[in-house]
Image: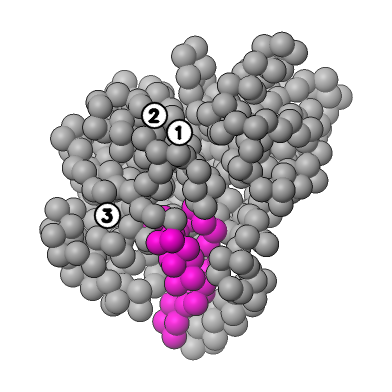
């Protein structure tokens, strides 16, 4: 399903939104995370895939590969950790925020407990950050989170609480437990009376967009390297973090944004239809675990309501096909390990370019330059092997060989 957003506007970045999220705070987030061993020193790769571009009949197809962001293999290494740092810094303003994740202040915060619900990656990011900072962490998992993802979070020292409901019910349970025990919720979705921490999480994701601007040499208030950016849905936090950065930097010259969600977890598309943050119309459960969210974050919607040009949904099988495509690589395309949620943008682009009518509606043609963000690698290695038919290790080996060959050819 594809719908145009009648509220989308091409204006300068509104001052009201800039007071909530800004390029300045995104860059501050990166500085504060720089000393953490759990994150890569430099920018994650921005790969051009010319063979994929040729098959899709577009001028450029690029992938920002967040699987290389950290050992967590996910963009979530930017969200929960910086939110934890900012939360601790508010409570202990005398602490140097850049040193919190080094464990230097563990004695001061050892009795401090954070809690969050998760589909997997956000919980891993929070658990890793809490472990390295020296505080306690509790993670609430819903019924559809795999045992493999649970084990990965538990291995980072978090206490696991399981419920029988879905993701939205796990968010409610985390809030209940926090109120009962005096713990602090570090969630990536907002709700009434709870916006500061989700804002910090989303602001961390702005680092991705800032890197893209630097990697492509984009100039402020001008059209950049990409005409179209396809972003994953979920509750809207990642998209809001990136859209806000692009919008502030490029103003009315921002790219054409297309939001992509599982057909059964379409809360953002439903929000566009109704004109306010809304719930999904389907069962929510999806192989795209990170996008299996039933309710839009009201804070994220403030940014998406007037910036996203189109909303669309995809089927699970289409995401899996895109996983296999990125893993395969080609003579000119580097193989990429992309998880179930990481390929939503490519899956959507293949649908759009396969239909002349849909291409026309979204302004896609042979001159289009398209960016997607691979938000995760094989965060559940067993599931990845089952879906792709090859292990993530094998794909990474082929990627390494491809990059080595490419480097030698350019030398």
What distance separates the C-alpha of mark 3 from that of mark 1? 26 Å
- Assign a secondary structure to mark 1: loop
Q: Contact, CB < 8 Å: mark 2 with mark 1?
A: yes
Give residue 306's quadrant in the image: top left
Would you say residue 336 sits in the magenta stretch? yes
Location of residue 326 with respect to 186 vertically, above or below: below
| Label placed on residue 403 | none
Q: Nearer the viewer, residue 339 or 240?
A: 339
Residue under the point 18% across and 53% down: 362
Residue under numbered circle 3 = 228
Question: Where are the magenta residues, as a range?
Answer: 317-345
Left or right: 167 as drawn, with respect to 332: right
Would you say residue 154 sits in the magenta stretch? no
Mark earlier in primary sequence (3, 1): 3
What distance separates the C-alpha of mark 2 from that of mark 1? 5 Å
| Label placed on residue 279 | 2
- Assign a secondary structure to mark 3: strand
Can you tell which of label 3 and label 2 is closer to the viewer? 2
Left or right: 392 as drawn, with respect to 236: right
Neighbourhood count class around disc 2 (C-alpha, 10 Å): few under 14, some 14–19, many 20 upward: many
């Amino acid at each position: 399903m594809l719908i145009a957003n009648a509220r989308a506007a091409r204006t300068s970045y509104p001052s009201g939104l800039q007071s909530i999220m800004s390029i300045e705070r995104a860059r501050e987030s990166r500085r504060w995370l720089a000393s953490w061993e759990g994150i890569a020193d430099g920018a994650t790769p921005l790969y051009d895939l010319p063979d994929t571009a040729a098959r899709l009949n577009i001028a450029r197809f690029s992938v920002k590969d967040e699987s290389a962001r950290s050992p967590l293999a996910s963009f979530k290494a930017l969200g929960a950790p910086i939110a934890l740092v900012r939360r601790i810094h508010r409570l202990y303003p005398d602490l140097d925020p850049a040193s919190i994740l080094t464990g230097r202040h563990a004695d001061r915060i050892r009795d401090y407990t954070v809690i969050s619900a998760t589909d997997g990656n956000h919980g891993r990011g929070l658990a890793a950050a809490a472990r390295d900072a020296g505080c306690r962490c509790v993670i609430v998992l819903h019924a559809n989170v795999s045992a493999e993802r649970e084990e990965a979070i538990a291995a980072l020292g978090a206490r696991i609480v399981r419920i029988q409901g879905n993701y939205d019910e796990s968010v409610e349970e985390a809030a209940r437990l926090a109120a009962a025990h005096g713990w602090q919720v570090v969630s990536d979705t907002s709700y009434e009376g709870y916006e500061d921490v989700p804002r910090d999480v989303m602001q961390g994701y702005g680092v991705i967009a800032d890197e893209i601007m630097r990697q492509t040499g984009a100039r402020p208030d001008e059209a950049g390297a990409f005409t179209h950016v396809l972003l994953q849905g979920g509750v809207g936090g990642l998209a809001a973090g990136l859209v806000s950065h692009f919008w502030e930097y490029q103003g009315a010259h921002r790219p054409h944004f297309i939001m992509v969600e599982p057909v059964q977890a379409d809360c953002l598309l439903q929000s566009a239809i109704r004109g306010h943050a809304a719930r999904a119309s389907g069962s929510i459960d999806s192989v795209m675990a990170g996008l299996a969210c039933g309710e839009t974050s009201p804070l994220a919607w403030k940014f998406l309501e007037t910036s996203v040009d189109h909303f669309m949904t995809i089927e699970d099988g289409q995401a899996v096909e895109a996983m296999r495509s990125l893993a395969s690589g080609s003579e000119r395309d580097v193989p990429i390990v992309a998880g179930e949620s990481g390929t939503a943008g490519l899956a959507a682009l293949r649908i759009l370019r396969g239909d002349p009518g849909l291409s026309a509606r979204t302004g896609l043609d042979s001159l289009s330059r398209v960016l997607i963000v691979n938000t995760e690698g094989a965060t559940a290695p067993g599931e990845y092997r089952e879906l792709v038919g090859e292990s993530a290790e094998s794909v990474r080996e082929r990627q390494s060989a491809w990059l080595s060959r490419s480097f030698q050819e350019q030398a």
